[in-house]
Amino acid sequence: MTSEKKQNNQLKWRLNPGYLIERGSDLESTLIFFGRFLADRSSQDPLPEKTLFSEQGTFEWGEIPPLEKVINSEEDWQFILQNPQIFRSSLFIIEPWDHVGINELSETVRASKNIAFIAQKIADCDSILFPVWQTGTLNLDSVIPILSASMAVILEGGNASVHNPTEWTYPNCSRENMLTLVEHLFLSRSPQSAPVIMICVSHQLAAESNIRLLQNAVNDVINTEKKSRDEDDEALLCLKAICEKIRSVGENIKIEKRDGRIVAQGWNDINFSVVLNEDKEIGERHLLPYKTPKAKNSMIPIELLEAHQVMAHEYEGIIDRMILEHGRDVAISMFHYDEVNEESILFANWAYMALHNAIVPHRYIIAGSHLSWLLQLPYSVKILASTEANGEILTECSCTCINYKDFETNKIRRSFTCQFHPELLNDLREIGKRPEPSYSELKESDGIRLLIRLLYHGMQE
């Protein structure tokens, strides 16, 4: 793209967020409208009636408002950096792939447009698209602070498998590039940062990133010889002991499928976090609250099971709350063949909690050392839900909550991942290829209500 075209692209951008409301939108108004949407299934649209489609009936990224904000270059980052009101009152949508799959109508589905439509229709909340499959991840040192200063970051799905690097064929964005981006986002979640929601293949990237971050933490601690101001090496000895245990457990866990097959041996196996599911999951499925396996029926180490039970009691799950409110199962849309392994998340949860608890008494020493990055790790990761069809659990780990606990206040911040596509209606079509859904149609969708609920709670933390 030439310099002139880049400048023309930026000139199309609205500098004041909001499209439906004359005075614009901000965080407070967005949360109010999200709360109104979630309050019931029958209230009228509180926003002005105005189509989000073009006069020609299209709804495409980069054409006209409200989809004009697309990152195509480093210059676009510099432009929004000079106009912070653009990103501070917007969602960032990151695409790792140009579509999330092909539906039964043989249509590719660019689900990022659905997220942008939903946020604008419900709350007049703008979206900015970052198509990393096209641009690459660019300079993460400048990208991550801007992403973190937005209202929320949503990583979309894609048509590649996390456990197969050769499927990541876009030259500007490899599997390694995406994992590095996700790891940076994991470590950027602070009391002032945006929540992150990761969908489908990004849910799988998050699972792999959990293990990579833990491996890096373990190696960094074990390879440390001495820390200044560590009297009698007490902090280092404590950290090394827990890291040796994490490494031992990680190297010896087996991933077993429901049919008894062992598909991975230890945390260095490329299939440890993600593997091909036993059955394809495409179409409507029901979400059930996740149930930690019973120790007598599982080969998973008992300390992993107990750690997750503790986490389940400590924090109420959003899925559980929705099911209690509805008095029925939550219906969502699945659109992928792979799944995150239950064992890898149970292991990551136990390891994060163990490492966090080992750090607490020595955090003053660690904060002043090269190991200070460990303070940015999650506190835990909880499996929220499983998917069910015809009375059978198909994906044990279909949704997770990544918890961060502040070392001084013990306050919790959350990000979320989900294997399913809450932004898709049950026809699995992208908005623009299907008619413009009404406010009442959006209110009836369990998946969309769940997406808004995740945003609503995450943005308030």
Image (cartoon, rainbow, N blue to C red):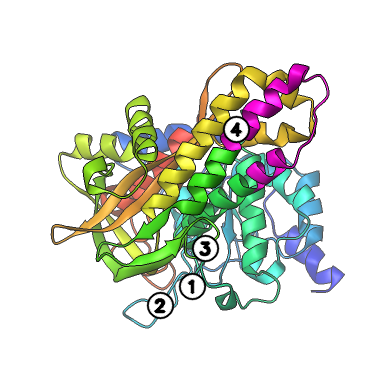
Residue at mark 3: 269
The amino acid type, in three-letter code, at marker 3 is Asp
Q: Which of the two discs, 1 and 3, sits closer to the camera?
A: 3
**As drawn, 171 above or below 277:** below
Mark-to-mark CA distance, 1 and 3:
22 Å
Residue at mark 2: 102
Q: Is residue 16 something that shows in the picture?
A: no
Local SS, label 3: loop
Local SS, label 4: helix
Mark-to-mark CA distance, 2 and 3:
29 Å
**As drawn, 285 above or below 366:** below
The residue under the point 83% across, 24% down is 228
Q: Is residue 254 magenta?
A: no
The amino acid type, in three-letter code, at marker 2 is Ile
In the picture provided, is 424 more to the left or to the right than 53?
left
The amino acid type, in three-letter code, at marker 4 is Ala
**Camera-nearest residue between 375 and 96:** 375
Please name the predominant secondary structure of the magenta segment in the image: helix
- Residue 359: quadrant of the picture: top right
Q: Which of the two discs, 4 and 1, sits closer to the camera?
A: 4
Number of numbered discs present? 4
N-terminal-most mark, 4 or 3: 4
Residue at mark 1: 159
The residue under the point 53% across, 58% down is 205
Mark-to-mark CA distance, 2 and 4:
48 Å
Q: Which of the two discs, 4 and 3, sits closer to the camera?
A: 4
Q: Which residues are magenta?
A: 216-243
N-terminal-most mark, 1 or 2: 2
The x and y percentages for residue 373 are 71, 36
Q: Is residue 242 magenta?
A: yes
Residue at mark 4: 241
The residue under the point 39% across, 58% down is 255
